[in-house]
Amino acid sequence: TRYFGGAKLGAGGLVSAYGEAAKRAIAAATFVEKVDRCAVELRVPYALHDAVRRMLAEWEALLDAESFAADVTMRLRVPRERLDAFAAALRDMSAGKIEVRET
């Protein structure tokens, strides 16, 4: 005999209650696509910072942190399969002024 939700249940009632709870949990569950991401650090001139920020959504890059000193340092997580193309797009857009480093 166990308690489930404050009610004392016998073996049959307990199995039924846990079974119903499991069914509801499975029905409410959603699928989430897991994306393999790699950590990247960018060194960006201030003049290009806004342009880079606008590119993040297009490339599905997630911004983890930014620090502002002589240049802007941005720490991102980029989908691994898109990293090379993302780095090339940044270099092309900035005429090579943006440094890209995988961390």
Image (spheres, grey):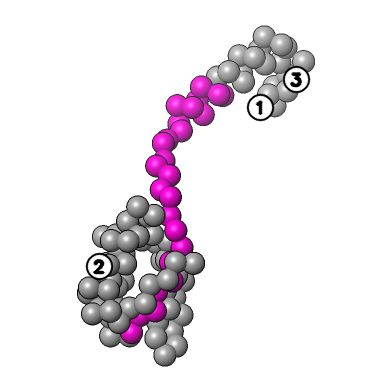
Mark number for residue 5?
Answer: 1
Above or below — where is 14 with respect to 96?
above
Q: Residue at x 72, y 12 (%)?
A: 10
In the image shown, does 13 or 63 lie closer to the viewer?
63
Rendering quarter of residue 7: top right
Q: Secondary structure at mark 2?
A: helix
Rendering quarter of residue 22: top right
Q: Left or right: where does residue 83 sit relative to residue 11?
A: left
- Give the amino acid at mark 1: Gly
Q: Left or right: where does residue 19 sit relative to residue 87?
A: right
Question: Between tags 3 and 1, which lies in front?
Answer: 3
Q: Residue at x 27, y 67 (%)?
A: 88
Q: CA distance from mark 3 to mark 1?
A: 10 Å
Q: CA distance from mark 3 to mark 2?
A: 61 Å
In the image shown, does 49 or 12 lie closer to the viewer?
49
Q: Residue at x 42, y 61 (%)?
A: 77
Where in the figure is residue 38, as x and y percent of width and height? 44, 58
Location of the N terminus (image quadrant) = top right
Question: Between tags 3 and 2, which lies in front?
Answer: 2
Mark 3 nearby-residue class (10 Å; few <14, some 14–19, many ≥20): few
Mark 1 nearby-residue class (10 Å; few <14, some 14–19, many ≥20): few
Q: Earlier in the sequence, mark 3 or mark 2?
A: 3
Mark number for residue 2?
Answer: 3
Q: Secondary structure at mark 3?
A: strand
Disc 2 target residue = 89
51 falls in the magenta region: no
Q: Earlier in the sequence, mark 2 or mark 1?
A: 1
- Give the amino acid at mark 3: Arg
- Give the amino acid at mark 2: Ala
Look at the image and give the residue range highlighted in magenta: 21-45
Above or below — where is 57 with respect to 52?
above
